[in-house]
Image (spheres, grey):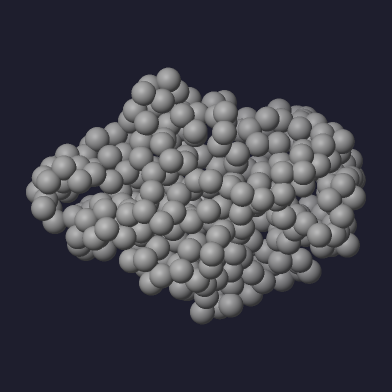
Amino acid sequence: MKIENVETWLAWKWVAVRVTCSDGTHGVGEAQFWGYAEATEAILRRMADDLIGQDPRHIDNLWNAAYRKYSFRSAAITAALSAIDVALWDIKGKRLGAPVWDLLGGKVRDNVRAMVLLGGDGPMRTPDDFAASAREAKAEGYSAVKMTPFPDGWAGLPYPQLIRTNTEIVAAVREELGWEIDIGVEIHRNMLPSEAVVFAERIAKFLPYFYEDPIAPESVFSMGEVAERLRIPLAVGERNATIWEFREYSALPGVHFVRPDVGLAGGITQAKKIAAIAESFHQRVIPHNFLGPVTTMACVQLAAATPNWDLQEYVREAGTPRAEAAANTVQVVDGYMQIPEGPGLGIDLDLAGIERHPYDPGAGDPARRADGSVALR
């Protein structure tokens, strides 16, 4: 059996990939470099030339050969490799008649706790908006939620108003949920180090489960300065793309959760390695994923077989392009994702659904301060 074809489709905010072998077996994956997905698709087409004719069983070797062919490094490259890697694991599972989690060592849990995003894809403006979204999540049975407690126009607020408003949002969600539900707080790199430290002090009494990306991730040193001053658990990693980057963050005092994106940080092969690095530091894994349904399913397969996999970030798929772009999307029951028992990933692409939702990266994050300068992120 050899790789015979690599196909790509730009679908809403990701690149969908299908790898087909000479015996007709195919696997699917997704690349999550969503802002510039066209670049990832171009890289995938170049990679296809080297992949065709190769034995799909040798996943790690194919990954290294593609990653090290040229000296250039970028998240667009690792996103492309992520999609190929997941598709090859899907093929391996189908070839051997086993779910991917079985090939990764077997189950360590019976289902996967979901952490639903408050607000989903829509904007929220006031503490009441956030509380209403939290109320809905609680009614649906979720035991963990995540939010970015910033109102519209946050970048133009004076410093004391920003801190007070954000604190009021966290307070409103905690009051709505009580103390039985975990709350993840994402800063989304919207703050300066000094602001992030003060805000963390203000919300510590609400016992957030984690405090994510208080500043931009480019500097491990700067993140370390913030981590030293925090008294709540720190989560980092959604923008990071290699095991070497994650190794440095895992070694940083104060980091308690790592957040690799399986569609960006190298696929199943590399995410398993990242989780092992984190495990050696007694850290837990809460993977980033708000884009595609295939990556969500890949995360569920990993979670089933990874001891320190903690929560799974989740955006409701029903009624969205995610549900239409794939068949057999992950099932959520009372806030827990169900682990598939069939061979491979347990999901496939719906090409007709993909055609209905062409690529649309949106406007991005053009937040600006009152003086017109670009805000953080």
In the displayed structure, does residue 102 sit left or right of residue 324? left
Q: Looking at this view, is 324 or 283 the one in front?
A: 324
In the displayed structure, does residue 40 sit left or right of residue 13? left
Q: Is residue 142 visible?
A: yes
- How many marks can you see? 0
Identity of the residue furthest to the top in this view: 356
| Residue at the image point whose x is 46% and y is 73% from the top | 276
Q: Is residue 237 visible?
A: no
| Residue at the image point whose x is 58% and y is 77% from the top | 282
The correct choice, above or below, for 185 with respect to 201 in the image is above
Instruction: Name the quadrant of the C terminus.
Output: top right
Q: Looking at this view, is 159 or 373 the one in front?
A: 159
Percent coordinates x, y for residue 122 in the rendering:
68, 30
| Residue at the image point whose x is 87% and y is 42% from the top | 165
In the displayed structure, does residue 254 sit left or right of residue 128? left
Q: Residue 214, located in which quarter of the rendered image? A: bottom right
Percent coordinates x, y for residue 96 in the rendering:
24, 60
Percent coordinates x, y for residue 321 in the rendering:
50, 29
| Residue at the image point whose x is 44% and y is 58% from the top | 301
Q: Residue 220, located in which quarter of the rendered image? A: bottom right
Percent coordinates x, y for residue 250 in the rendering:
54, 71
The correct choice, above or below, for 207 with respect to 346 in the image is below
